[in-house]
Amino acid sequence: MSLNIRIRVVDKKGSVFEGFADFCEIPTEAGIEGVLPGHINFISNLIEGKIKYKTGETVNEINIVGGGFVEISGDCVNVMINF
């Protein structure tokens, strides 16, 4: 099992963010989904909010305005944002 998760965020124009993090939070229809390495496979619709991801002591955010969906598979988080 990896110690990091790989996060890929894309929209209609292409890549918004791609990198590694220790932890992330995704705003889904069921609530805020916290993701650590080894998370179960998961697919959900996104709601308006912020993706938060932490690397070391730094917390970064990506705004989600128009929804989308997230797929978590293995240690990868793939996010498609609608505008």
Image (cartoon, rainbow, N blue to C red):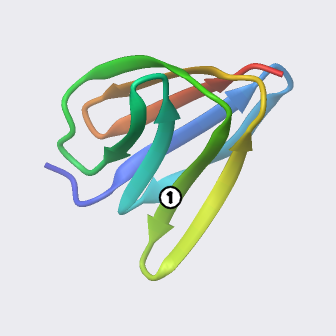
Residue pointed to by mark 1: 53
**Residue displayed at 65% across by 41% down:** 49
The residue closer to the viewer here, 8 or 50, is 50
Left or right of residue 74, residue 1 in this image: left
Residue lying furthest left? 1
Q: Is residue 66 above or below residue 18?
A: above
Left or right of residue 38, residue 22 in this image: right
Q: Is residue 44 above or below residue 20?
A: above
**Residue displayed at 34% across by 47% down:** 34
Q: Position of residue 16 (x, y in %)?
A: 74, 41
Q: Position of residue 18 (x, y in %)?
A: 60, 46
Q: Quadrant of the C terminus?
A: top right
Count the marks: how many? 1
**Residue displayed at 67% across by 46% down:** 17
Residue lying furthest bottom? 57
Q: Position of residue 2 (x, y in %)?
A: 21, 53
The residue closer to the viewer here, 29 or 13, is 29
Which image quadrant is residue 79 in? top right
**Residue displayed at 48% across by 22% down:** 29
What residue type is disc 1 on? Tyr
Q: Neighbour class for label 1 at 10 Å: few (<14), some, many (≥20)?
A: many
Left or right of residue 58, residue 13 in this image: right
Q: Is residue 12 above or below residue 16?
A: above
Q: Position of residue 48 (x, y in %)?
A: 68, 32
Which image quadrant is residue 59 in? bottom right
Which image quadrant is residue 23 in? bottom left
Disc 1 on helix, strand or loop? strand
